[in-house]
Image: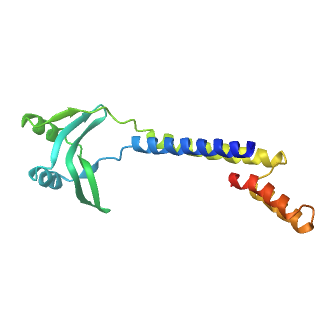
Amino acid sequence: MSEHRSALYMACGLSAFLLMIVVLLNLIDSAPARVSDEQFIKISEADLIESLVIEPDGFYWQLRRLVRIGGRRGEDLADRIVLLQADSLALEEWRSAGKPIREGQGNWRYWGPLVVASLLAVGLWHGWTQIRLDANGEGAPRRRLQVLDRELKEGKITEEEFRERAERIWPEL
């Protein structure tokens, strides 16, 4: 019964971990697409810009919908744009035209490295715990199944004992 409880705890822990990864990945914003002055003018004339967003570390234009932006790497879909050359003149023209301006919250730029570092830490922790289990003699589930199989072939255990012990190991895989 404790093996089933252990498997349940492992499944719940894994589910919580995966949920945390999804939440963290949703917090990571992609960088705004960089556009040339000509592209910016075309997007502006097509009335695709919703507002100018000013953040503590810069500014960008929020688009009304996803727009295909052509660049060096081909076409990308973007919902935010910035000029290739940061141009404070464009910012002043936008303000003087009375177009919408919003204050942004800023994006903590370390979300991506934080997620990668936490995934690496969890992977290292898991590897270390598996090494410790193996050193303590319990061994990895596959190794224990191999030992069971060898014991069955050598006649040390019966088919019934093999099935019973293997069923306790399978949830760990």
- Quarter of the image for the C terminus: give it: bottom right
In this view, the residue in front, 58 or 152, is 152
> How far across and down, in percent of the image, does residue 29 sit?
36, 44
Relative to residue 170, is residue 97 depicted above or below? above
Relative to residue 108, is residue 41 depicted above or below? below
> How far across and down, in percent of the image, does residue 125 sit?
66, 42
Coloring applied to the structure: rainbow
- Quarter of the image for the N terminus: give it: top right
Q: Residue at x 74, y 56 (%)?
A: 167
Q: Residue at x 85, y 48 (%)?
A: 137
In this view, the residue in front, 40 or 172, is 172
Quarter where residue 86 is shown: top left
> How far across and down, in percent of the image, does residue 39 sit?
17, 55
Q: Residue at x 50, y 43 (%)?
A: 19
Q: Is residue 152 left or right of residue 15?
A: right
Q: Residue at x 70, y 46 (%)?
A: 4
Return the residue found at the far bottom.
Answer: 153
Return the residue found at the far left.
Answer: 97
> How far across and down, in percent of the image, does residue 163 sit?
79, 60
